[in-house]
Amino acid sequence: MSSPLTLIATLTTLPGQADAVEAGLRLLVPASQAETGCLQYNLHRHQQQPNIFIMVEQWQDAAALSAHQQTAHFLHFGQTCGSLLAQVDHQLMQRIA
C-alpha cells in the first residue's frame, strides 16, 4: 500500500482580493474534506502577510488527489477566484515517517 501524499499549496492574492479569496477557500474546505481519499484539508492565513493562504492537504494516494482536482467545487474555485490570485505554489511530498 502506498503512503499518503501531502500537498502544501500556498496561494498569494492580488492586492485587495484576500477577503474574496478567503470566502472562496472557506467554501472549498468542507466539500474537499468530505471527499473519499481526503485525510486532511486545512486552510491557514499568514499572520504577517494576510494576502497569503496556505492549504495543508493530505490525500490517501495520487488517485485521490487527481480526483479532487476534477471535482465541481475545485473547478468552481478556479473559475471564481483564479483571476484573483497572483501566485500559486504547490509542494507535493510523500510522507515517510
Image (cartoon, helix red, strand yellow):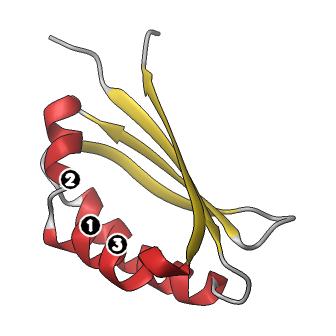
CB under 8 Å between discs 1 and 2 = yes
Q: How far across and down, in percent of the image, does residue 3 sit?
A: 28, 16
Q: Which residue is mark 3?
A: 78
> Mark 1 or 2 closer to N-term?
2
Q: How far across and down, in percent of the image, does residue 42 sit?
A: 47, 56
Q: Return the mark for residue 68.
A: 2
Q: Which residue is mark 1?
A: 74
CB under 8 Å between discs 1 and 3 = yes
Mark 1 to mark 2 CA distance (whole Å)? 7 Å
Q: Amino acid at mark 3?
A: Gly
Q: Which structural element holds mark 1?
A: helix
Q: Amino acid at mark 2?
A: His
Q: How far across and down, in percent of the image, does residue 53 sit?
A: 62, 63
Q: Nearer the viewer, residue 1 or 78?
A: 78
Q: Quadrant of residue 31?
A: bottom left
Q: Amino acid at mark 1?
A: Phe
CB under 8 Å between discs 3 and 2 = no
Is 87 on the left or on the right of 76, as rendered?
right
| Residue pictured at 39% horizontal, 53% vertical | 41
Which image quarter is the N terminus in? Answer: top left
Q: Nearer the viewer, mark 3 or mark 2?
A: 3
